[in-house]
Amino acid sequence: MKAIVTVIGKDQVGIIASVCSLLSSHNINILDISQTVLQEYLTMVMLVDLSACDKPIVEVGRALEQTGKERGLSIRIQREDIFNAMHRI
Amino acid sequence: MLNHNEILQTIQMIDQQHLDVRTITMGISLLSCAHSDVKTACDKVYDKVTRYAEKLVSTGEAIEAEFGIPIVNKRISVTPIALVAAAAETDNYTPFALALDRAAKTCGVNFIGGFSALVQKGMTDADRKLIASIPQALSETDIVCGSVNVGSTKAGIDMDAVALMGRTIKELAGRTADRGGFGCAKLVVFCNAVEDNPFMAGAFHGVGEPEKVINVGVSGPGVVHHALQAVKGQPFDVVAETVKKTAFRITRMGQLVAQEASRRLDTPFGIVDLSLAPTPAVGDSVARILEEMGLEVCGTHGTTAALALLNDAVKKGGVMASSSVGGLSGAFIPVSEDEGMIAAARSGALTLDKLEAMTCVCSVGLDMIAVPGDTSAETLSAIIADEAAIGMVNSKTTAVRIIPAPGCKVGDTVEFGGLLGSAPVQPVHPWSSAGFIARGGRIPAPMQSLKN
Protein backbone atom coordinates (compact mmCIF):
# COMPACT_ATOMS: atom_id res chain seq x y z
CA MET A 1 0.00 0.00 0.00
CA LYS A 2 1.20 3.50 -0.85
CA ALA A 3 0.52 6.59 1.18
CA ILE A 4 1.26 10.30 1.17
CA VAL A 5 3.02 11.96 4.08
CA THR A 6 2.60 15.73 4.32
CA VAL A 7 4.46 18.09 6.60
CA ILE A 8 3.20 21.65 6.95
CA GLY A 9 4.55 24.36 9.25
CA LYS A 10 7.42 26.69 10.06
CA ASP A 11 10.74 25.61 8.56
CA GLN A 12 13.38 24.43 11.05
CA VAL A 13 16.52 22.30 11.21
CA GLY A 14 16.03 18.53 11.16
CA ILE A 15 12.45 18.15 9.96
CA ILE A 16 13.29 15.75 7.15
CA ALA A 17 15.72 13.85 9.36
CA SER A 18 13.18 13.26 12.11
CA VAL A 19 10.38 12.24 9.73
CA CYS A 20 12.65 9.97 7.71
CA SER A 21 14.12 8.25 10.75
CA LEU A 22 10.66 7.56 12.09
CA LEU A 23 9.58 6.14 8.73
CA SER A 24 12.68 3.99 8.40
CA SER A 25 12.24 2.65 11.94
CA HIS A 26 8.96 1.13 10.75
CA ASN A 27 10.50 -0.15 7.53
CA ILE A 28 8.64 2.34 5.35
CA ASN A 29 10.31 3.10 2.02
CA ILE A 30 10.30 6.66 0.65
CA LEU A 31 9.57 6.64 -3.10
CA ASP A 32 9.45 10.33 -3.85
CA ILE A 33 9.83 13.57 -1.99
CA SER A 34 9.16 17.22 -2.83
CA GLN A 35 9.19 20.35 -0.77
CA THR A 36 8.72 24.08 -1.05
CA VAL A 37 9.65 26.79 1.40
CA LEU A 38 7.79 30.07 1.11
CA GLN A 39 8.75 32.76 3.62
CA GLU A 40 9.91 30.25 6.23
CA TYR A 41 6.73 28.23 5.69
CA LEU A 42 7.51 24.66 4.72
CA THR A 43 5.31 22.21 2.88
CA MET A 44 6.77 18.79 2.23
CA VAL A 45 5.08 15.92 0.43
CA MET A 46 6.39 12.35 0.41
CA LEU A 47 5.14 9.30 -1.42
CA VAL A 48 5.88 6.25 0.71
CA ASP A 49 5.48 2.50 0.38
CA LEU A 50 4.04 0.67 3.38
CA SER A 51 4.11 -2.87 1.98
CA ALA A 52 6.91 -3.91 4.37
CA CYS A 53 5.77 -1.71 7.25
CA ASP A 54 5.65 -3.38 10.67
CA LYS A 55 2.69 -1.34 11.98
CA PRO A 56 -0.81 -0.48 10.75
CA ILE A 57 -0.99 2.89 8.98
CA VAL A 58 -3.16 4.30 11.77
CA GLU A 59 -0.39 3.77 14.34
CA VAL A 60 2.24 5.26 12.04
CA GLY A 61 -0.09 8.23 11.69
CA ARG A 62 -0.28 8.67 15.46
CA ALA A 63 3.53 8.54 15.79
CA LEU A 64 3.94 11.12 13.02
CA GLU A 65 1.33 13.36 14.59
CA GLN A 66 3.22 13.17 17.89
CA THR A 67 6.53 14.07 16.21
CA GLY A 68 4.76 16.99 14.54
CA LYS A 69 3.30 18.23 17.80
CA GLU A 70 6.74 18.32 19.44
CA ARG A 71 7.99 20.59 16.65
CA GLY A 72 4.84 22.65 16.15
CA LEU A 73 4.16 21.11 12.74
CA SER A 74 1.22 19.37 11.15
CA ILE A 75 2.39 15.94 9.97
CA ARG A 76 -0.01 13.37 8.62
CA ILE A 77 -0.12 10.20 6.57
CA GLN A 78 -3.03 9.37 4.29
CA ARG A 79 -3.60 6.53 1.87
CA GLU A 80 -2.75 7.59 -1.67
CA ASP A 81 -6.18 6.46 -2.94
CA ILE A 82 -7.94 9.55 -1.60
CA PHE A 83 -5.79 11.88 -3.70
CA ASN A 84 -6.06 9.71 -6.78
CA ALA A 85 -9.83 9.64 -6.43
CA MET A 86 -10.03 13.42 -6.27
CA HIS A 87 -7.49 14.36 -8.89
CA ARG A 88 -7.27 11.50 -11.41
CA ILE A 89 -10.04 10.13 -13.59
CA MET B 1 3.37 10.93 -8.82
CA LEU B 2 0.54 13.21 -7.87
CA ASN B 3 1.59 16.78 -8.04
CA HIS B 4 2.48 18.72 -4.94
CA ASN B 5 -0.31 21.26 -5.42
CA GLU B 6 -3.04 18.66 -5.85
CA ILE B 7 -2.09 17.05 -2.58
CA LEU B 8 -2.02 20.36 -0.75
CA GLN B 9 -5.35 21.33 -2.32
CA THR B 10 -6.99 18.24 -0.83
CA ILE B 11 -5.44 18.90 2.58
CA GLN B 12 -6.60 22.50 2.46
CA MET B 13 -10.15 21.38 1.61
CA ILE B 14 -10.19 19.13 4.67
CA ASP B 15 -8.45 21.52 7.07
CA GLN B 16 -9.87 24.88 6.11
CA GLN B 17 -12.97 24.30 4.01
CA HIS B 18 -14.76 21.68 6.11
CA LEU B 19 -14.63 18.95 3.48
CA ASP B 20 -16.01 15.77 4.97
CA VAL B 21 -18.09 12.71 4.39
CA ARG B 22 -21.26 13.73 6.18
CA THR B 23 -22.60 10.28 6.89
CA ILE B 24 -22.17 6.57 6.36
CA THR B 25 -25.63 5.14 6.82
CA MET B 26 -26.33 1.44 7.01
CA GLY B 27 -29.79 0.48 5.85
CA ILE B 28 -31.19 -2.61 7.56
CA SER B 29 -34.36 -4.48 6.63
CA LEU B 30 -36.47 -5.30 9.68
CA LEU B 31 -39.21 -7.10 7.77
CA SER B 32 -38.06 -10.39 9.31
CA CYS B 33 -38.72 -9.00 12.81
CA ALA B 34 -42.52 -8.89 12.59
CA HIS B 35 -44.22 -10.80 15.41
CA SER B 36 -47.62 -10.74 17.08
CA ASP B 37 -46.03 -10.32 20.50
CA VAL B 38 -44.63 -6.81 20.98
CA LYS B 39 -41.80 -7.80 23.28
CA THR B 40 -40.61 -10.59 20.99
CA ALA B 41 -40.76 -8.25 17.98
CA CYS B 42 -38.80 -5.55 19.81
CA ASP B 43 -36.16 -8.05 20.95
CA LYS B 44 -35.80 -9.20 17.35
CA VAL B 45 -35.40 -5.58 16.21
CA TYR B 46 -32.72 -4.91 18.83
CA ASP B 47 -30.83 -8.11 18.03
CA LYS B 48 -30.88 -7.60 14.29
CA VAL B 49 -29.79 -3.96 14.35
CA THR B 50 -26.95 -4.58 16.81
CA ARG B 51 -25.81 -7.67 14.91
CA TYR B 52 -25.69 -6.00 11.48
CA ALA B 53 -24.31 -2.63 12.60
CA GLU B 54 -21.93 -3.95 15.25
CA LYS B 55 -18.82 -2.82 13.36
CA LEU B 56 -20.28 0.21 11.59
CA VAL B 57 -18.77 2.85 13.86
CA SER B 58 -15.35 1.20 14.27
CA THR B 59 -15.10 0.67 10.50
CA GLY B 60 -16.04 4.29 9.87
CA GLU B 61 -13.38 5.45 12.30
CA ALA B 62 -10.73 3.20 10.73
CA ILE B 63 -11.45 4.57 7.24
CA GLU B 64 -11.38 8.08 8.66
CA ALA B 65 -7.93 7.53 10.15
CA GLU B 66 -6.39 5.77 7.15
CA PHE B 67 -7.63 8.17 4.50
CA GLY B 68 -7.42 11.28 6.65
CA ILE B 69 -10.94 12.36 5.70
CA PRO B 70 -13.42 13.17 8.48
CA ILE B 71 -16.55 10.99 8.52
CA VAL B 72 -18.83 13.07 10.69
CA ASN B 73 -21.73 10.72 11.31
CA LYS B 74 -22.36 7.00 11.34
CA ARG B 75 -26.05 6.21 11.21
CA ILE B 76 -28.62 3.48 10.72
CA SER B 77 -31.86 3.47 8.75
CA VAL B 78 -34.46 0.74 9.08
CA THR B 79 -37.64 -0.47 7.39
CA PRO B 80 -40.59 1.85 8.15
CA ILE B 81 -41.75 0.65 11.55
CA ALA B 82 -45.44 0.82 10.54
CA LEU B 83 -44.71 -2.20 8.33
CA VAL B 84 -42.67 -4.08 10.93
CA ALA B 85 -45.11 -3.43 13.77
CA ALA B 86 -48.28 -4.13 11.81
CA ALA B 87 -48.40 -7.73 13.02
CA ALA B 88 -47.94 -6.79 16.69
CA GLU B 89 -51.04 -6.89 18.87
CA THR B 90 -50.83 -3.41 20.37
CA ASP B 91 -52.10 0.12 19.81
CA ASN B 92 -48.91 1.84 20.89
CA TYR B 93 -45.69 1.46 18.90
CA THR B 94 -43.46 3.34 21.35
CA PRO B 95 -41.74 0.10 22.49
CA PHE B 96 -40.35 -0.24 18.95
CA ALA B 97 -38.85 3.26 19.16
CA LEU B 98 -37.34 2.42 22.54
CA ALA B 99 -35.81 -0.76 21.10
CA LEU B 100 -34.33 1.23 18.19
CA ASP B 101 -32.96 3.83 20.60
CA ARG B 102 -31.26 1.16 22.71
CA ALA B 103 -29.87 -0.62 19.66
CA ALA B 104 -28.50 2.61 18.17
CA LYS B 105 -26.81 3.52 21.43
CA THR B 106 -25.27 0.05 21.71
CA CYS B 107 -23.85 0.45 18.19
CA GLY B 108 -22.57 3.95 18.98
CA VAL B 109 -24.28 5.68 16.05
CA ASN B 110 -25.68 9.18 16.53
CA PHE B 111 -29.09 8.72 14.87
CA ILE B 112 -31.35 5.89 13.75
CA GLY B 113 -34.12 6.63 11.26
CA GLY B 114 -37.22 4.72 10.29
CA PHE B 115 -39.96 5.31 12.83
CA SER B 116 -41.92 5.91 9.68
CA ALA B 117 -45.09 5.32 7.71
CA LEU B 118 -45.84 5.66 4.00
CA VAL B 119 -49.41 6.88 3.65
CA GLN B 120 -49.49 8.77 0.35
CA LYS B 121 -52.63 6.97 -0.80
CA GLY B 122 -54.22 6.24 2.54
CA MET B 123 -53.54 4.91 6.00
CA THR B 124 -53.63 1.33 7.24
CA ASP B 125 -54.51 0.65 10.87
CA ALA B 126 -50.79 0.25 11.55
CA ASP B 127 -50.01 3.60 9.91
CA ARG B 128 -52.58 5.31 12.13
CA LYS B 129 -51.14 3.65 15.22
CA LEU B 130 -47.63 4.68 14.24
CA ILE B 131 -48.59 8.32 13.69
CA ALA B 132 -50.51 8.32 16.98
CA SER B 133 -47.38 6.94 18.70
CA ILE B 134 -45.02 9.57 17.26
CA PRO B 135 -45.36 12.21 20.03
CA GLN B 136 -44.62 9.72 22.79
CA ALA B 137 -42.04 7.73 20.81
CA LEU B 138 -39.94 10.69 19.69
CA SER B 139 -40.15 12.51 23.02
CA GLU B 140 -39.16 9.46 25.09
CA THR B 141 -36.20 8.49 22.88
CA ASP B 142 -33.02 10.45 22.22
CA ILE B 143 -31.76 9.50 18.78
CA VAL B 144 -34.72 7.94 16.97
CA CYS B 145 -35.94 9.85 13.91
CA GLY B 146 -39.32 9.50 12.28
CA SER B 147 -40.89 10.40 8.97
CA VAL B 148 -44.27 10.18 7.29
CA ASN B 149 -44.75 10.28 3.54
CA VAL B 150 -48.08 12.00 2.89
CA GLY B 151 -47.98 12.42 -0.87
CA SER B 152 -46.44 11.38 -4.16
CA THR B 153 -46.62 12.29 -7.82
CA LYS B 154 -48.19 8.89 -8.49
CA ALA B 155 -50.77 8.90 -5.68
CA GLY B 156 -51.59 12.52 -4.93
CA ILE B 157 -51.75 13.94 -1.42
CA ASP B 158 -53.51 12.26 1.49
CA MET B 159 -55.06 15.32 3.13
CA ASP B 160 -56.33 13.31 6.11
CA ALA B 161 -52.71 12.44 6.87
CA VAL B 162 -51.69 16.06 6.31
CA ALA B 163 -54.27 17.20 8.87
CA LEU B 164 -53.12 14.51 11.28
CA MET B 165 -49.44 15.50 10.93
CA GLY B 166 -50.17 19.14 11.83
CA ARG B 167 -51.72 17.96 15.10
CA THR B 168 -48.92 15.43 15.65
CA ILE B 169 -46.22 18.08 15.27
CA LYS B 170 -48.05 20.34 17.74
CA GLU B 171 -48.33 17.56 20.29
CA LEU B 172 -44.70 16.50 19.85
CA ALA B 173 -43.56 20.11 20.34
CA GLY B 174 -45.63 20.28 23.53
CA ARG B 175 -44.12 17.09 24.89
CA THR B 176 -40.58 18.40 24.29
CA ALA B 177 -41.35 21.99 25.35
CA ASP B 178 -38.49 21.98 27.87
CA ARG B 179 -36.06 21.54 24.95
CA GLY B 180 -37.60 24.15 22.63
CA GLY B 181 -39.75 21.57 20.84
CA PHE B 182 -36.66 19.55 19.95
CA GLY B 183 -38.73 16.44 19.17
CA CYS B 184 -39.95 18.11 15.97
CA ALA B 185 -36.36 18.31 14.70
CA LYS B 186 -36.47 14.51 14.50
CA LEU B 187 -39.68 14.33 12.46
CA VAL B 188 -39.98 14.90 8.70
CA VAL B 189 -43.17 15.00 6.62
CA PHE B 190 -42.39 14.01 3.04
CA CYS B 191 -43.84 14.03 -0.41
CA ASN B 192 -42.10 11.62 -2.82
CA ALA B 193 -39.84 10.25 -0.06
CA VAL B 194 -36.85 8.29 -1.36
CA GLU B 195 -36.01 4.81 -0.10
CA ASP B 196 -32.23 5.17 0.01
CA ASN B 197 -31.69 8.54 1.68
CA PRO B 198 -28.71 8.44 4.06
CA PHE B 199 -29.47 11.83 5.65
CA MET B 200 -31.43 12.36 8.85
CA ALA B 201 -34.04 12.92 10.02
CA GLY B 202 -35.75 11.50 6.93
CA ALA B 203 -33.77 8.30 6.39
CA PHE B 204 -35.57 4.97 6.23
CA HIS B 205 -34.77 1.66 4.53
CA GLY B 206 -37.31 1.19 1.76
CA VAL B 207 -39.04 -2.10 1.02
CA GLY B 208 -37.41 -2.23 -2.42
CA GLU B 209 -33.97 -2.25 -0.81
CA PRO B 210 -31.81 -5.33 -0.07
CA GLU B 211 -31.35 -6.99 3.32
CA LYS B 212 -28.69 -4.46 4.26
CA VAL B 213 -26.93 -1.69 2.36
CA ILE B 214 -24.35 1.08 2.76
CA ASN B 215 -25.33 4.56 1.60
CA VAL B 216 -22.99 7.51 1.88
CA GLY B 217 -23.79 11.22 1.99
CA VAL B 218 -21.04 13.63 0.97
CA SER B 219 -20.87 17.29 1.76
CA GLY B 220 -18.73 20.34 1.16
CA PRO B 221 -20.47 23.72 0.91
CA GLY B 222 -17.23 25.30 2.14
CA VAL B 223 -15.25 23.82 -0.74
CA VAL B 224 -17.75 25.07 -3.33
CA HIS B 225 -17.78 28.51 -1.71
CA HIS B 226 -14.00 28.68 -1.79
CA ALA B 227 -13.89 27.60 -5.44
CA LEU B 228 -16.38 30.32 -6.38
CA GLN B 229 -14.31 32.99 -4.66
CA ALA B 230 -11.73 32.39 -7.37
CA VAL B 231 -14.18 33.29 -10.19
CA LYS B 232 -15.63 36.53 -8.81
CA GLY B 233 -17.64 38.57 -11.31
CA GLN B 234 -17.42 35.99 -14.11
CA PRO B 235 -20.47 34.80 -16.11
CA PHE B 236 -22.74 32.02 -14.87
CA ASP B 237 -21.32 29.53 -17.38
CA VAL B 238 -18.04 29.79 -15.47
CA VAL B 239 -19.84 29.54 -12.12
CA ALA B 240 -21.65 26.36 -13.22
CA GLU B 241 -18.43 24.79 -14.53
CA THR B 242 -16.61 25.60 -11.30
CA VAL B 243 -19.34 24.06 -9.16
CA LYS B 244 -19.41 20.97 -11.38
CA LYS B 245 -15.68 20.39 -11.11
CA THR B 246 -15.75 20.82 -7.35
CA ALA B 247 -18.76 18.54 -6.93
CA PHE B 248 -16.98 15.92 -9.03
CA ARG B 249 -13.98 15.90 -6.70
CA ILE B 250 -16.10 15.77 -3.55
CA THR B 251 -18.20 12.93 -4.90
CA ARG B 252 -15.19 10.88 -6.02
CA MET B 253 -14.01 10.98 -2.44
CA GLY B 254 -17.47 9.90 -1.23
CA GLN B 255 -17.52 7.05 -3.72
CA LEU B 256 -14.12 5.83 -2.50
CA VAL B 257 -15.25 5.89 1.12
CA ALA B 258 -18.53 4.17 0.25
CA GLN B 259 -16.80 1.34 -1.60
CA GLU B 260 -14.27 0.90 1.16
CA ALA B 261 -16.98 0.80 3.84
CA SER B 262 -19.07 -1.60 1.78
CA ARG B 263 -16.11 -3.96 1.34
CA ARG B 264 -15.02 -3.90 4.98
CA LEU B 265 -18.53 -4.36 6.33
CA ASP B 266 -19.36 -7.03 3.73
CA THR B 267 -22.49 -5.06 2.91
CA PRO B 268 -23.60 -4.11 -0.62
CA PHE B 269 -22.92 -0.53 -1.70
CA GLY B 270 -26.16 1.33 -2.35
CA ILE B 271 -25.72 4.92 -3.41
CA VAL B 272 -23.75 8.09 -2.91
CA ASP B 273 -25.99 11.02 -2.06
CA LEU B 274 -24.31 14.09 -3.47
CA SER B 275 -25.87 16.72 -1.32
CA LEU B 276 -24.41 19.99 -0.17
CA ALA B 277 -25.30 19.68 3.50
CA PRO B 278 -24.39 22.74 5.58
CA THR B 279 -23.49 22.85 9.27
CA PRO B 280 -23.74 25.78 11.68
CA ALA B 281 -19.94 26.22 11.48
CA VAL B 282 -18.68 29.38 9.78
CA GLY B 283 -17.44 28.50 6.28
CA ASP B 284 -19.80 25.55 5.83
CA SER B 285 -22.87 27.37 4.58
CA VAL B 286 -25.02 26.99 1.44
CA ALA B 287 -26.41 30.52 1.93
CA ARG B 288 -22.91 31.95 1.65
CA ILE B 289 -22.45 30.19 -1.73
CA LEU B 290 -25.58 31.92 -3.03
CA GLU B 291 -24.32 35.24 -1.68
CA GLU B 292 -20.94 34.62 -3.34
CA MET B 293 -22.81 34.62 -6.67
CA GLY B 294 -23.58 38.30 -6.09
CA LEU B 295 -26.54 38.49 -3.72
CA GLU B 296 -26.24 40.90 -0.81
CA VAL B 297 -28.06 38.49 1.43
CA CYS B 298 -29.62 35.06 0.91
CA GLY B 299 -33.38 35.47 0.46
CA THR B 300 -33.33 38.57 -1.70
CA HIS B 301 -34.53 38.56 -5.34
CA GLY B 302 -32.34 36.24 -7.39
CA THR B 303 -31.91 33.67 -4.63
CA THR B 304 -34.11 31.07 -6.31
CA ALA B 305 -32.21 31.35 -9.59
CA ALA B 306 -28.87 31.08 -7.81
CA LEU B 307 -30.03 27.99 -5.94
CA ALA B 308 -31.37 26.42 -9.15
CA LEU B 309 -27.96 26.78 -10.78
CA LEU B 310 -26.16 25.44 -7.74
CA ASN B 311 -28.45 22.44 -7.33
CA ASP B 312 -28.18 21.47 -10.99
CA ALA B 313 -24.41 21.92 -11.22
CA VAL B 314 -23.84 19.82 -8.09
CA LYS B 315 -25.78 16.94 -9.67
CA LYS B 316 -24.08 17.23 -13.04
CA GLY B 317 -20.63 17.27 -11.48
CA GLY B 318 -21.37 14.47 -9.07
CA VAL B 319 -23.19 12.06 -11.30
CA MET B 320 -20.09 11.07 -13.29
CA ALA B 321 -18.03 10.60 -10.15
CA SER B 322 -20.15 7.84 -8.67
CA SER B 323 -21.27 4.47 -10.00
CA SER B 324 -24.65 4.97 -8.36
CA VAL B 325 -26.17 8.25 -7.32
CA GLY B 326 -29.33 8.40 -5.27
CA GLY B 327 -30.91 9.65 -2.09
CA LEU B 328 -31.86 13.30 -2.14
CA SER B 329 -28.82 14.62 -4.07
CA GLY B 330 -28.80 18.39 -4.35
CA ALA B 331 -28.44 21.39 -2.09
CA PHE B 332 -30.00 21.39 1.37
CA ILE B 333 -31.37 24.57 2.89
CA PRO B 334 -32.00 23.78 6.56
CA VAL B 335 -32.29 27.16 8.24
CA SER B 336 -31.06 26.32 11.74
CA GLU B 337 -28.13 24.26 10.44
CA ASP B 338 -26.67 26.92 8.16
CA GLU B 339 -24.81 29.91 9.57
CA GLY B 340 -25.66 32.09 6.55
CA MET B 341 -29.35 31.08 6.56
CA ILE B 342 -29.61 31.87 10.26
CA ALA B 343 -28.17 35.34 9.65
CA ALA B 344 -30.46 35.92 6.66
CA ALA B 345 -33.57 34.78 8.54
CA ARG B 346 -32.66 36.90 11.53
CA SER B 347 -32.25 40.00 9.37
CA GLY B 348 -35.71 39.39 7.89
CA ALA B 349 -34.39 38.93 4.33
CA LEU B 350 -35.18 35.21 4.26
CA THR B 351 -38.88 34.59 4.82
CA LEU B 352 -40.94 31.42 4.90
CA ASP B 353 -42.47 32.36 1.54
CA LYS B 354 -39.06 32.74 -0.09
CA LEU B 355 -37.91 29.46 1.42
CA GLU B 356 -40.98 27.80 -0.08
CA ALA B 357 -40.05 29.17 -3.50
CA MET B 358 -36.48 27.94 -3.04
CA THR B 359 -37.72 24.41 -2.34
CA CYS B 360 -39.06 24.26 -5.91
CA VAL B 361 -35.51 24.14 -7.20
CA CYS B 362 -33.45 22.48 -4.46
CA SER B 363 -33.25 18.95 -3.21
CA VAL B 364 -35.62 18.89 -0.27
CA GLY B 365 -37.91 21.36 1.41
CA LEU B 366 -38.75 23.56 4.37
CA ASP B 367 -36.14 22.25 6.73
CA MET B 368 -35.40 23.07 10.36
CA ILE B 369 -37.60 26.13 10.51
CA ALA B 370 -38.84 27.45 13.85
CA VAL B 371 -42.22 29.18 13.95
CA PRO B 372 -44.09 30.73 16.91
CA GLY B 373 -45.34 28.27 19.52
CA ASP B 374 -48.93 29.43 19.11
CA THR B 375 -49.02 28.49 15.40
CA SER B 376 -52.15 26.40 14.92
CA ALA B 377 -52.10 22.76 13.85
CA GLU B 378 -54.14 23.74 10.77
CA THR B 379 -51.53 26.30 9.71
CA LEU B 380 -48.79 23.66 10.11
CA SER B 381 -50.88 21.27 8.02
CA ALA B 382 -51.42 23.92 5.37
CA ILE B 383 -47.65 24.56 5.19
CA ILE B 384 -47.17 20.80 4.73
CA ALA B 385 -49.86 20.71 2.03
CA ASP B 386 -48.20 23.55 0.08
CA GLU B 387 -44.85 21.85 0.23
CA ALA B 388 -46.29 18.45 -0.72
CA ALA B 389 -48.03 20.07 -3.71
CA ILE B 390 -44.70 21.44 -4.95
CA GLY B 391 -43.18 17.96 -4.70
CA MET B 392 -46.15 16.23 -6.28
CA VAL B 393 -46.38 18.50 -9.31
CA ASN B 394 -42.64 18.77 -9.92
CA SER B 395 -41.95 15.03 -9.41
CA LYS B 396 -39.37 15.76 -6.74
CA THR B 397 -38.91 15.08 -3.07
CA THR B 398 -40.14 17.80 -0.75
CA ALA B 399 -40.28 17.74 3.00
CA VAL B 400 -41.29 19.77 5.99
CA ARG B 401 -39.36 19.73 9.24
CA ILE B 402 -40.88 22.55 11.21
CA ILE B 403 -40.72 23.36 14.91
CA PRO B 404 -43.56 25.32 16.53
CA ALA B 405 -41.30 26.32 19.43
CA PRO B 406 -43.41 26.33 22.61
CA GLY B 407 -43.62 29.71 24.30
CA CYS B 408 -41.51 31.40 21.61
CA LYS B 409 -42.44 34.45 19.56
CA VAL B 410 -41.10 35.94 16.34
CA GLY B 411 -37.59 37.23 16.95
CA ASP B 412 -36.72 34.66 19.63
CA THR B 413 -34.02 32.08 18.95
CA VAL B 414 -34.38 28.36 19.67
CA GLU B 415 -31.16 26.50 20.48
CA PHE B 416 -30.94 22.84 19.49
CA GLY B 417 -27.18 22.44 19.77
CA GLY B 418 -24.68 20.43 17.75
CA LEU B 419 -25.34 19.87 14.07
CA LEU B 420 -28.96 20.98 14.48
CA GLY B 421 -27.83 24.50 15.33
CA SER B 422 -30.12 27.33 16.39
CA ALA B 423 -33.20 28.70 14.66
CA PRO B 424 -34.58 32.23 14.71
CA VAL B 425 -38.37 32.02 15.11
CA GLN B 426 -39.92 33.11 11.82
CA PRO B 427 -43.40 34.54 11.27
CA VAL B 428 -46.22 32.63 9.57
CA HIS B 429 -49.26 34.20 7.93
CA PRO B 430 -51.86 35.08 10.58
CA TRP B 431 -54.82 34.18 8.35
CA SER B 432 -56.53 30.85 8.97
CA SER B 433 -56.40 27.75 6.75
CA ALA B 434 -58.69 25.77 9.08
CA GLY B 435 -61.57 25.37 6.61
CA PHE B 436 -59.18 24.08 3.96
CA ILE B 437 -57.59 21.48 6.21
CA ALA B 438 -60.93 20.37 7.70
CA ARG B 439 -62.09 19.06 4.32
CA GLY B 440 -59.86 15.96 4.40
CA GLY B 441 -59.87 13.39 1.59
CA ARG B 442 -57.29 13.19 -1.13
CA ILE B 443 -55.87 15.65 -3.64
CA PRO B 444 -55.77 13.57 -6.84
CA ALA B 445 -52.49 12.81 -8.58
CA PRO B 446 -51.57 15.33 -11.29
CA MET B 447 -51.56 14.66 -15.03
CA GLN B 448 -47.83 13.93 -15.04
CA SER B 449 -48.50 10.79 -13.00
CA LEU B 450 -50.08 9.19 -16.06
CA LYS B 451 -46.90 8.14 -17.81
CA ASN B 452 -47.72 4.58 -18.78
Image: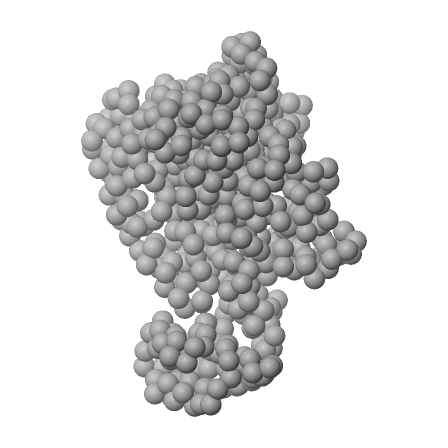
Q: Where, by quadrant of the figure, is residue A61 drawn?
A: bottom left
Compared to B156, does B6 lie above or below?
A: below
| Residue B270 position in % (x across, y down) | 47, 49
State the count of labels. 0
* B430 sits to left or right of B215: right
| Residue B272 position in % (x across, y down) | 51, 51
Is residue A58 visible from the viewing direction of this image? Answer: yes
Is residue B204 visible from the viewing direction of this image? Answer: no
Front-lying residue, B166 or B87 = B166
Residue for point 59% across, 58% down: B223
Front-lying residue, B215 or B74 = B74
Q: Where, by quadrant of the figure, is residue B46 drawn?
A: top left
* B9 sits to left or right of B87: right
Residue for point 60% across, 81% down: A38
Q: Where, by quadrant of the figure, is residue B331 drawn?
A: top right
Report the quarter where the C terminus of chain B lies: top right
Report the quarter where the N terminus of chain B lies: bottom right
Compared to B316, does B135 lie above or below?
A: above
Compared to B11, does B233 lie above or below?
A: above
Q: What coloring was used for the rendering?
A: one colour
Which residue is farthest right?
B235
| Residue B167 position in % (x across, y down) | 43, 19
Front-lying residue, B254 or B405 = B405
* B446 sits to left or right of A55: right
* B63 sits to left or right of B255: left
Compared to B384, does B349 lie above or below?
A: below
| Residue B109 position in % (x across, y down) | 34, 49
Residue for point 32% across, 81% down: A54
Residue for point 65% across, 60% down: B227
